[in-house]
Image (tube, rainbow, N blue to C red):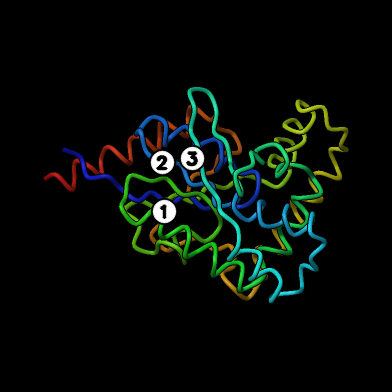
Amino acid sequence: MNKRLIIAIDGPSGAGKSTLSKALAKKLDYLNIDTGAMYRSVALLAGQQQIDPQDETALKRLCSDMSIEFVREATSERVIVNGIDVSAAIRTPAVSLLTAQVAACPAVREAMMMLQRKMGEGGGVVLEGRDIGTVVFPYADIKFFLSATAAERGLRRYEELKEKGIDIDLQQTIAEVEARDAVDTARTHAPLKQADDALVVDSTHLSIEDVLEKMLLVVKNKQAELVG
């Protein structure tokens, strides 16, 4: 019987982490833990409660009082926060911008890290984010680092939002991706960073299917190695 692995997928915003994490988890029948959605959920509630993103005490209290659950269905995954489906609400541009500020708060990152570890400690999980392989699960069985150019990532985000009926400018979207990169890499607490032992996959010119195939091969080889 194959060991149920802990698989970390890191990378910048728009690199395809969410899509590939879901696809990989579904193929392996693993739990997909979208850590970005967790930070977005904190940002959503902070915005609703008009909490200053610089108010660490208030954000810490918010995190201690909230519950986050991931529910996988036949064709989709839902994010449930305090019993409410926030899957769509956490994906707006406004929440995206606030998320970068909220995620820079040490108290928020500590709270989410503890929750992520609790969710994934038993294995059989795919976690995606920006510091999974370096901070949350540095001992993960497999670490992937997905990358793509900022222009390509901005285009993907633009097309995703247009499909949802959100009126957005392409150049503005690319600029927001670059701004998010700057915040994520510059923050002092758990910055976006590639783990030394991560396998880098540049998805700029690859389809989701191509990248998924590469990832599944790595998982297969790892499981064979552990059995052997």
Q: Position of residue 208 (x, y in %)?
A: 53, 30
Q: Position of residue 38 (x, y in %)?
A: 59, 52
Q: Is residue 12 above or below residue 166?
A: below
Would you say 194 lies left or right of 228 here?
Answer: right
Query: Would you say the residues marked 3 and 2 are in contact, meaning their CB atoms lie under 8 Å apart?
Result: no
Give 48 or 201, whichever is nearer the viewer: 48
Rendered residue at 65%/38% (across/down): 87
Q: Determine which residue is flagged by label 2.
A: 31
C-alpha separation, residue under disc 1 versus residue under disc 3? 15 Å
The quadrant of the rendering that contains the C terminus is: top left
Q: Is residue 228 above or below residue 22?
A: below
Rendered residue at 39%/64% (across/down): 138
Q: Position of residue 159 (x, y in %)?
A: 75, 30
Query: Would you say the residues marked 2 and 1 are in contact, meaning their CB atoms lie under 8 Å apart?
Result: yes
Give 211 or 13, whichever is nearer the viewer: 13
Query: Would you say the residues marked 1 and 3 are in contact, meaning their CB atoms lie under 8 Å apart?
Result: no
The quadrant of the rendering that contains the N terminus is: top left
C-alpha separation, residue under disc 3 versus residue under disc 2? 10 Å
Q: Is residue 180 above or below residue 146?
A: below
Determine which quarter of the picture holds residue 39: bottom right
Q: Position of residue 139 (x, y in %)?
A: 34, 62
The nearer-to-camera label among 3 and 2 is 2
Q: Determine which residue is flagged by label 1.
A: 119
Rendered residue at 43%/51% (across/down): 8
Which numbered disc covers residue 21? 3
Which numbered disc covers residue 155? none
Q: Earlier in the sequence, mark 1 or mark 3?
A: 3
